[in-house]
Image (cartoon, rainbow, N blue to C red):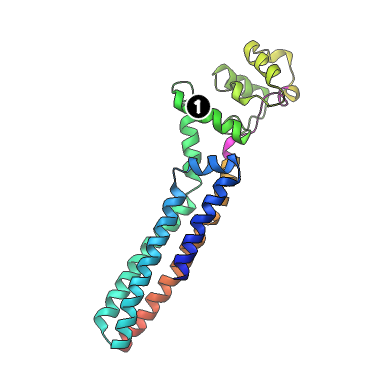
Amino acid sequence: MALLAFSACSIVKRQEFRKESETNKLMVDLDNNASLKMLVMATLISILLIFLSFFGFCGAFGDKICLVSYYLVFASLNLALVIVGGIIVLRFSKIPQDLLSEHMADYNNNQTSKDLVDKIRATLGCCLVHRMNNLEELKYATENQIVTASCCDSHQQEKCRQFLRDQSFQLMRWEDLNGIVVTEGCIPQIADMSERVSGFTLPFFILIGCLDLSAILLSTALCCRI
């Protein structure tokens, strides 16, 4: 019951996280509802645990080894599911990162990808997948039409657009361009937010795993006693 309440509270917390800012909303949208699916999975597992606990309770007090054996098998299967769920949570940060890389590669060929990347850039204040560190990297990205007006610093829009039209790299220093074009990468910021999202999903699977392990040990002891 405590786990069920914990699951419900975290679903509410996820919604509050989503409403905190446009950045958080974008992060939740980028994960393709993976975190919500995990929380729903945790809720279903908690309901299953209540059902299995009833089997264990009846078997323990009735000295019915059959029910206790069923309880042991179900608890073991549930632990396996929890381990898989935990692995998914640990890999959660890769979901939005892979999605961004895919859309960034298709930026000039797909309007949907272009719109999504532009939205991410405007919301997170970043430009490419990774940070640009020198003039050559910026020149290469601009020539390949990856750096567009959505990479312009919000306070230098006109100057930046002029620079992108002229592509006058030889006339400017990197230090000057760094203040006109956003050079920060999007992946580090997404990874940081992914950790926040995973922060309220991973504890579920740790708690569920501990409960499952306790159930396995208890049911094993009961089977031996009966």
Residue in the picture at 36% in, 75% down? 53
Expressed as whole percent of the image width and height from the top left, the position of residue 148 reads 58, 21
* Chief secondary structure of the magenta portion: loop
Crowd class of label 1 (few under 14; some 14 to 19; many from 20; radius 10 Å): some
The residue nearer to you, when weighing 222 against 29, is 29
Q: Is residue 201 left or right of residue 80?
A: right
Instruction: State the image quarter where residue 138 is shown.
Output: top right
Q: Where is mark 1, residue-wise? A: 115
Q: Amino acid under label 1?
A: Asp
Q: Is residue 85 among the parts visible in the rendering?
A: yes
Q: Is residue 19 above or below residue 102?
A: below
Q: Magenta includes 181?
A: yes
Q: Report the magenta residues as a range.
A: 177-187
Residue in the picture at 37% in, 75% down? 216
Expressed as whole percent of the image width and height from the top left, the position of residue 184 reads 64, 33
Expressed as whole percent of the image width and height from the top left, the position of residue 203 reads 51, 62
The residue nearer to you, when weighing 27 against 13, is 13
Q: Is residue 87 above or below residue 62?
A: above
Residue in the picture at 52% in, 50% down? 15
Residue in the picture at 46% in, 37% down? 99
